[in-house]
Image (cartoon, helix red, strand yellow):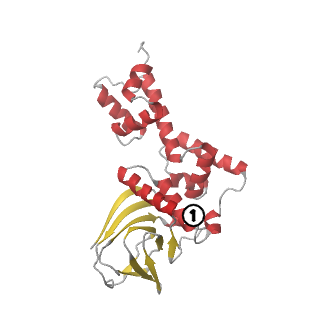
Amino acid sequence: MLSARRIFDGEGVRVWDVACRHGAGRGSAAEHAGGHAIVFVRRGCFVRSADGVDAVLDPTVAYCMNPGEEQRFDHPHGHGDDCTSVALDADVAAGLWGGDPALPGGALPVAPALDLEHRLLLAESLRGDDVSERALGLVARTLEAAGPRRVASGRPATARARRALADAAREALAERPERSLVELARLLAVSPHHLSRVFRAQTGHTIARHRMRLRVRAALDRLGGGGAHAADGGGSVELARLAFELGFADQAHMTRVVRAETGATPSALRAALSDPRT
């Protein structure tokens, strides 16, 4: 009747593909929400009862869940429904909602642009991309309908503060590119959403893209300096090892990212950059 598949698992944020095939009629027993989440309806229509309030939910709205919240789902039609759930750790939810992890109740409007953003999030999650920043941005923009000041609280107020925050993030990533968005935000004492927005505004690209660019630079350095050459294996093994050491998912992932950044494959770059004296 109900199936949920986790399609992205990052630090502080997870994305679930949820399908319900309940027949028409009242839901069975009351359920209890397991954690903080915001749920976007992709298809279908159902009624959620929580804290004595009924909300009709369809693809034009989203709703929030909080840990332990008692809820019941009724189904006016027998066609089933599909949703995307973005689950948040308590501190991440609090950072998005003005310091309070208790997310708002009732239905939240989802404008066409947000609905498209939600579907892009789903597609990127299914491709295996790092969607932490897209997910947090989507949640923040949706929560702004219920409390724009709460979502905006904690945002660096001055141009100097925003530049300092972006610079501090770059310094931290230069030391350890594998730092996640949530880890960076904790280190810099800001919310992940605000860090993501400020960083993109200051640098012109996302933190995830910056992380990949640092890895590509490291790959170029290793390819040119002989770091990808091993005495006991062929080229494919060498590049696979390099991909692992630099934090790419695998050699194919490294090849895609390097080609996107440089227009050439790692093997071609190794031939072009290698010192003929080595």
| Residue 203 shows up from this direction | yes
| Residue 91 shows up from this direction | no
x, y percent for residue 61: 47, 71
In this image, 48 relative to 157: left or right?
A: left
x, y percent for residue 64: 48, 72
Give the residue drawn at x 49%, y 55%.
134
Q: Which of the 4 image quarters holds residue 238?
A: top left
For residue 117, above or below residue 147: above
The kind of residue tagged 1 is Gly
x, y percent for residue 186: 56, 56
Q: Which of the 4 image quarters holds residue 205?
A: top right
For residue 217, above or below residue 53: above
Which of the pair 179/266 is nearer the observer? Answer: 266
x, y percent for residue 2: 29, 72
In this image, 15 relative to 80: left or right?
A: right
Report the number of discs: 1
Residue ID for mark 1? 95
Which of the pair 246/36 is nearer the observer? Answer: 36
Q: Residue furthest top?
A: 277
> Which quadrant would the C terminus be assigned to in this image?
top left
**Which element carries disc 1, helix, strand or loop?**
helix
Give the residue drawn at x 28%, y 25%.
234
Q: Which of the 4 image quarters holds residue 120?
A: bottom left
Q: Residue furthest bottom?
A: 52
Give the residue drawn at x 45%, y 23%.
224
> Which quadrant would the N terminus be assigned to in this image?
bottom left
Crowding at mark 1 (Cα within 10 Å: few <14, some 14-19, many 20+): many
